[in-house]
Image (cartoon, grey):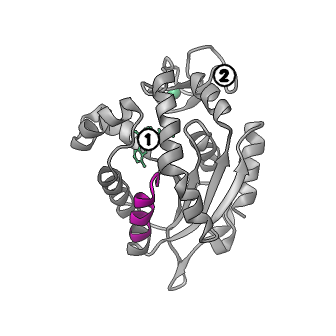
């Protein structure tokens, strides 16, 4: 198993000689590239599983589940969804995973309370926290990236009008759906999301640094290079 994994063998925690679930957290502001990088890593390594809290929430909103109905307003305003909703969603997901794999958490945890809940969930299912990768990108660049961001409602693929353009403008390369702009990607909401990131998520940097788990990775430059830096940070 570890042979086909981009993570070094000691990133696998062994329990009775058997590799079990491992967790890698991707940390970074809105638009820092967590989803894009996770997508690239997962495509090259089947032992990795990308878990995007934002995607899970958008799916819950689309399906109008109880959690989705409650989350919708917070998301539209660029505020954080209450910790309890998120914690349940992630715990359900982790409980449903069978066999060894490494979870790439993208968008979770986003508050210190969520990080503490995650510690409990990780311990509870015998998993371990392998590393926390911080994608460092300046605010001006984040604003620019989000302004050009496009998403495929069909298959979830992400694009940027100039940085990652589709072959045909406005159309998904993978499935041919018309690309859309996320509801919370308008300038007013983006300002709020950046402020929320500073106030509520940045404290996590110190939280994980204090444990020696934090790996800082410059999140600008060609995507292939960033992916390579993340791989190195995890090996
Ligand atoms: P981005 O990282 O680009 O802001 P996401 O897709 O990760 O976008 O998140 C979109 C929205 O979903 C957030 O603004 C927030 O409302 C909600 N959300 C996602 N993850 C969490 C979380 N862990 N805790 C609270 N709210 C969250
Ligand atoms: Zn698509």
Q: Quadrant of the C terminus?
A: bottom right
At mark 2, the secondary structure is loop
- In the image, which is nearer the foreground, mark 2 or mark 1? 1
Where is residue 131 shown, x and y percent of the image? 61, 64
Whether label 1 lies within 8 Å of ligand 1 gets the answer yes
Q: Residues within 10 Å of mark 1 (few under 14, many from 20)?
A: some
Where is residue 36 shown, x and y percent of the image? 61, 39
- Residue that label 2 marks: 165
Q: Residue at x 35, y 60 (%)?
A: 91
* In the rendered image, the vertical position of residue 199 relative to residue 127, given as above or below: above
Magenta region = 109-120
Q: Residue at x 55, y 64 (%)?
A: 207
- Residue that label 1 marks: 54
Q: Residue at x 63, y 28 (%)?
A: 145
Q: Residue furthest top?
A: 169
* In the rendered image, the vertical position of residue 51 relative to residue 113, given as above or below: above
Q: Residue furthest left?
A: 66
Q: Residue at x 44, y 69 (%)?
A: 119
């Amino acid at each position: 198993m570890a042979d086909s994994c981009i993570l070094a063998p000691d990133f696998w925690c062994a329990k009775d000689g058997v590799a079990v679930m491992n967790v890698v957290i991707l940390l970074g502001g809105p638009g820092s590239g967590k989803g894009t990088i996770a997508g690239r890593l997962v495509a090259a390594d089947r032992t990795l599983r990308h878990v995007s809290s934002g995607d899970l929430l958008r799916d819950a909103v689309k399906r109008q589940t109880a959690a989705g109905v409650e989350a919708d307003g917070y998301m539209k305003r660029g505020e954080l969804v209450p910790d309890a909703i998120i914690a349940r969603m992630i715990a359900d997901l982790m409980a449903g995973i069978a066999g060894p794999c490494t979870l790439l958490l993208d968008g979770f945890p986003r508050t210190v309370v969520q990080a503490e809940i995650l510690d409990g969930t990780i311990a509870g299912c015998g998993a371990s926290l392998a590393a926390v990768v911080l994608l460092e990108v300046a605010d001006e660049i984040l604003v620019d990236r989000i302004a050009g961001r496009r998403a495929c409602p069909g298959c979830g693929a992400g694009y940027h009008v100039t940085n990652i353009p589709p072959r045909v403008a406005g159309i998904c390369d993978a499935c041919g759906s018309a690309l859309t702009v996320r509801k919370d990607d308008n300038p007013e909401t983006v300002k709020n999301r950046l402020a929320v990131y500073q106030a509520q998520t940045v404290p996590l940097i110190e939280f994980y640094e204090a444990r020696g788990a934090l790996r800082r990775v410059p999140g600008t430059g060609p995507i292939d290079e960033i992916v390579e830096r993340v791989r190195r940070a995890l090996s």
